[in-house]
Structures are given as C-alpha cells and as structure tokens.
Image (cartoon, rainbow, N blue to C red):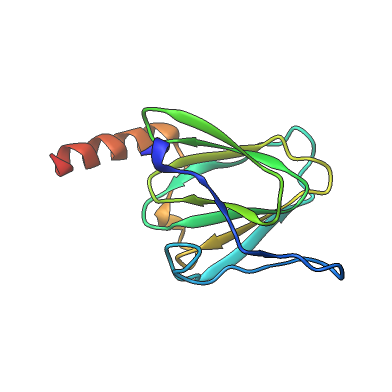
Amino acid sequence: MIDKIKIVKLPRIEDPRGNLTFIENSRHIPFNIKRVFYLYDVPGGALRAGHALRECHQFLVAMSGSFDVVLDDGHKRKRFHLNRSYFGLHIPPLIWREIDNFSSGSVCMALASEYYEGNDYYRDYKDFLSAIKAKQRKDK
C-alpha cells in the first residue's frame, strides 16, 4: 500500500504577476472536499499528527515553507518532503501519519474527504496495527 502513495503535481499557471495553482474535487484529488484545515506556528522540533484515519482521505500541501510527512501502512514506512505549493500528498485511510521537520513559517494545508469525527481516528499505534491485521484477515 505505501508504495502506491506518491506526491501529486498540481496544475501551475505561471504568470509574471504571480503564479496560480488550483485543486478540483475528484479531478486532482480522488475525493470531494468536506473540510479544510491548516497547521501553522508549529514550534521547532515539534511532531504533529501521530494518528491514522478509518475512513477519511486527506491531501496535504505545503502552502509555505516545508515539512516532512512520514507514512506507515503497518508494514513499511516512507518519508515525503513537501516544500512547494503546487505539490500535494494524498493520504488514503488506514495509513499512520506523522509530520515533522517544519521550517520556520511553514503552513500545512489539509483537505479532507470527511467532516471532523473524533471516532474516525486511531490515536494509538497499537490500535492501528490491530485494525490493519483485522482488515487483512477480513480481506482474505
């Protein structure tokens, strides 16, 4: 699963007056957007996220600055560096994510396929691993 996750290049219209990038539902991302939130003023050395989602897809974009996203599917881990506002990272459900290495002044925008629901979160890594194992047994 983790090997299928890639950074997505978004449309970029270059103009001497300033560039423009856009994201369209089900065209550039494989879901309709129900929620937008962003992380900012993250202190140096801080780690954000540290969870997985049961049903919700997310798409992360570095609107300013840079940060790393570490993804884990229960078997493998992969690190992605986001540092341009015309690249994003689609994170499907049941992928553990951690965000670190924030540069000064960075802003991480997240587009989500679902409204916030606290019960959609696996906040404990052991619970996440148990859910992955249960899904694998069910899928067999």
- Which residue is outermost to the left? 140
x 79%, y 50%: residue: 41
- Please tell me in which quadrant of the rendered image residue 37 appears: bottom right
Q: Where is residue 133 in the image (x, y as percent from the top left)?
A: 25, 34
Residue 14, by quadrant, is bottom right
Q: Which residue is drawn at 71% across and 34% down?
A: 101
Please report the residue visible at 50 percent of the width from the left and 56 percent of the height from the top: 58
Q: Position of residue 103 (x, y in %)?
A: 79, 40
- In the rendered image, the residue lying farthest to the right is 17
Viewer-proximal residue among 27 and 109 = 27
> Is residue 62 shown above or below 25?
above
Q: Is residue 20 left or right of residue 129?
A: right
Residue 120 percent coordinates (x, y): 41, 55
Q: Which residue is drawn at 71% across and 45% down?
A: 83
Quarter of the image that includes the N terminus? top left
Horizontally, is 5 left or right of 50 in the view?
Answer: left
Vertical relation: 30 (above or below) 64:
below
> In the figure, 49 relative to 108: above or below?
above
Q: Where is residue 122 in the image (x, y as percent from the top left)?
A: 42, 45
Does 100 sit left or right of 120 as displayed?
right
